[in-house]
Each structure stands twice: as C-alpha cells, then as structure tokens.
Amino acid sequence: AQNDLIEDASKTVWFTSFDLPSQQRLKDLEAALWLDAYTTIVQVSFITYDGDSDLLRLTNLNFMFSRTGHIWKKFVQKSIKLHPYASAWPYVVDILFYMQVTFLFACEVKEIVTHVRKRKPLLATFKEYMGIWNAVDWTFIILAYSILALWILRVRLVGEIRDELLDLPPDAKSCSGDDCATLWDPIFGDVIEVEHMVARVRILSAFFPLVVCLRLFKAFSAQPRLAIVTETARKAMPNLAHYLVVFLSMFATYAVMGVAFFGR
C-alpha cells in the first residue's frame, strides 16, 4: 500500500519557488540519477493556508511507477482547521453531549454496584448484569470517550502546528537546502500526524452511528408497539444467519471475479 512505503530522507529535496535556479537544480538531479529504475513513488508535497475558511491544507501529488512503465498519478489534499473552537457553540455542543455520556456512565456504574451488593459469585453477577443492552451502552460509552481522547490530542497537535507557524522567521519562504528542512520538516511531520489521527477518529466515528441506532432499539423495546421490530429481528436471527452464509459466499465469488476483471 502507498501508506506503507518508507520515504528516503536522503532524497528529499526542498524548493521554495520554481525559478531558474530551481529548474537548474531539477536538471542536476536528473543528471545525477535521482530518479532511477528502483524508484517506486515520487511525492510532491506543499502546504497552503486558506484564511477565509481557516484551513491549513497539505497537498500531495504522487507519481507511482509500475514495472510496466506506466506512471500512475494521484492527487490527495487534506485539510486541518487551525481554530476548531473559533466560537462558543462547539464548546456548548461538546459539553452537552459528554454530559449525557457521563450521566449514562454514572447510571451503569450505579447498576453494577447494585448487583455487586447482592454478594453473588462474580460470574453469576456478570451474567445477571451484562445483557445485550448493557453491552450496547458500554460500547457507546467506550467509543464516545475514545473519540474524545483522540479529539483532545488532535486539538493539542493543531495548537502546536499553529505555534510553529507563528514562530517561523520572516525569511522562511525564501529558505534553501538544510535550512528548509530545519524550518519546515517538523511542521510537515505534525500535519501528517494529525491526518493519521483524523483517520483513526473517522474509523471510530463510522461505527458510532450504528451504536446509537442500537441504543434507539433499546428505547423501542420499552414500548410494546415499537418493540415489534426488535422482537421480529430477534426471532428471525437464526434464519438471517443462514441466509448471510449463502449471501457472503456469493458476494465473495463476485468480488474475486471483479478483481480478476478490473483489479490492478
């Protein structure tokens, strides 16, 4: 995968403009076989700032070289909001949401204490407490606090990037060689780290609506007419499981055929 490739830092070249000296430098690199037969990918990266939307953008233009001689081109742009809490409303929304999560956490802990006070064996207490809906609640709590922890780390890193940009000297745009690496390499590294963290948050956030939907089914089960859907799904689960086996077998077959026809 592209993300698994290791960059050769000795071949990193910094440019602050595309003037005649820079063009000559590119010709010198070509003459020195900077790009050879063993090169897998060449990445052109630069950072821009959009003041209107307060977005710091990392742009990557990737040239991937296949053994057949074809050059695959991929343009990737990632953005970071430098001031995620520019107004009071994000604070209000986040505080209200995590107050609700903390209240649910307190209720679950109280229920656990109630079961523990019955002084039953540990395994019996666990079986009595940990039903399907309590498992859903704990999954909701763990996911919510995990997203919060990653978000706090992200905000801290974005603050460090903001401080690094403000601390740049006035001549940072006209640097050359090792000076550019000293000034800009930490900023590029922090931006990439934030993007990796955003990817992890995105994975957790993708499953979070499903857990919220399951908690809605828990609320539906308290009302007889709304509970019809959940009871129907529960009773049909064995048949759905057998159907899923057949469906996944056919789906995997078509997936393999699709890769054989159109994959690369």
Image: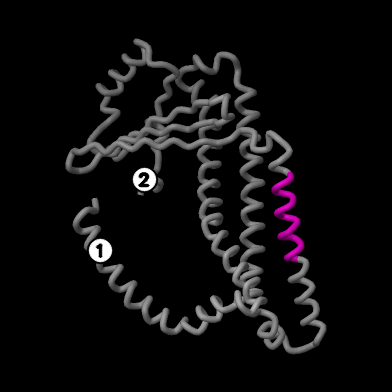
State whether residue 159 is above or below residue 1: above
Residue at the image point whose x is 40% and y is 32% from the top: 10
State whether residue 91 is above or below residue 229: above
Number of numbered discs overlaid on the protein picture: 2
Q: Is residue 8 magenta?
A: no
Residue 220 vs residue 163, the one in the foreground: 220
Earlier in the chain: of badge 2 and badge 1, it is: 2
Residue at the image point whose x is 29% and y is 40% from the top: 40
Residue 120 appears in which quarter of the rendering?
bottom right
Q: Residue furthest front?
A: 225
Read off the residue under disc 1.
Answer: 256
Segment tinted magenta in the rendering: 92-105
Amino acid type of the residue tagged 1 in the rendering: Val
Read off the residue under disc 2.
Answer: 2
**Which one is closest to the eye, mark 2 or mark 1?**
1
State whether residue 178 is above or below residue 213: above
Decide if residue 153 is on the left or right side of residue 29. Answer: right
Badge 2: how crowded within 10 Å, few (<14), some, or many (20+)? Answer: few
Decide if residue 9 is on the left or right side of residue 194. Answer: left
Check disc 1 and report its element: helix, strand or loop.
helix
Q: Position of residue 83 (x, y in %)?
A: 64, 34
